[in-house]
Image (cartoon, grey):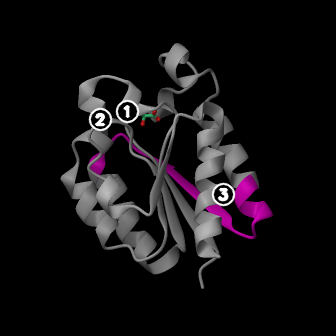
Amino acid sequence: MSKEILLLSGPNLNLLGTRSPEIYGTDTLDEHVARASARALAGGYQLRHLQSNFEGALIEAIHEARERSAAIVMNAGALTHVSWPLNDALATFQGPKVEIHLSNPAAREPFRHLSTLAAVVSGSISGFGPLSYELGVDAAIALLG
Ligand code: DQA
């Protein structure tokens, strides 16, 4: 079995650290990913991370994961609320899939209340701020058994 977990970060998450710090905190994406990588290594997995502002690049990474990754952890950013193509892509991946968010979209504007991914992921982690990426990896490892 593959020992790789794919971590995906969607649009605007490259701006973490300076983007709405009152909502998303001041940690950069690199800092979130570094802690998530440490969690993966502690559990015996290698973390591969891709951030893209392009939906198609995220879809292609999911397709590639079908052949090479044991699990997917994904913060799709605002694509979470609108992307049926991401829903379709994730549905083709057989392993554990964990949706993560730094904030709690259910407690925010109404347009954030729908997740197009919710029906095709194993589960979701939202609202844990600087812990969300690590908890997402922990959840994936737990599901991998
Ligand atoms: C987010 C929540 C989304 O609603 C938002 O569009 C983001 C970040 C989060 O991590 O809290 O870009 O996914």
Determine whether the residue tagged by mark 2 lies in a helix, strand or loop.
loop
On screen, residue 39 versus residue 14, left or right, reads: right
Q: Residue 42 is drawn in which quadrant?
A: bottom right
Q: x, y percentage for residue 29? A: 58, 35
**Part of the protein shown in magenta:** 39-55
Report how far apart the C-alphas of labels 3 and 2 lie in the structure: 24 Å
Name the residue carrying label 1. Answer: 106
Viewer-proximal residue among 120 and 93: 120
Name the residue carrying label 3. Answer: 138
Q: Amino acid at mark 3?
A: Asp
First in sequence, mark 1 or 2: give its number: 1
Q: x, y percentage for residue 140? A: 58, 63
Report how far apart the C-alphas of labels 3 and 1 lie in the structure: 22 Å
Q: x, y percentage for residue 121? A: 39, 61
Name the residue carrying label 2. Answer: 113
- In the image, farthest residue toward the bottom: 1
Determine whether the residue tagged by mark 3 lies in a helix, strand or loop.
helix
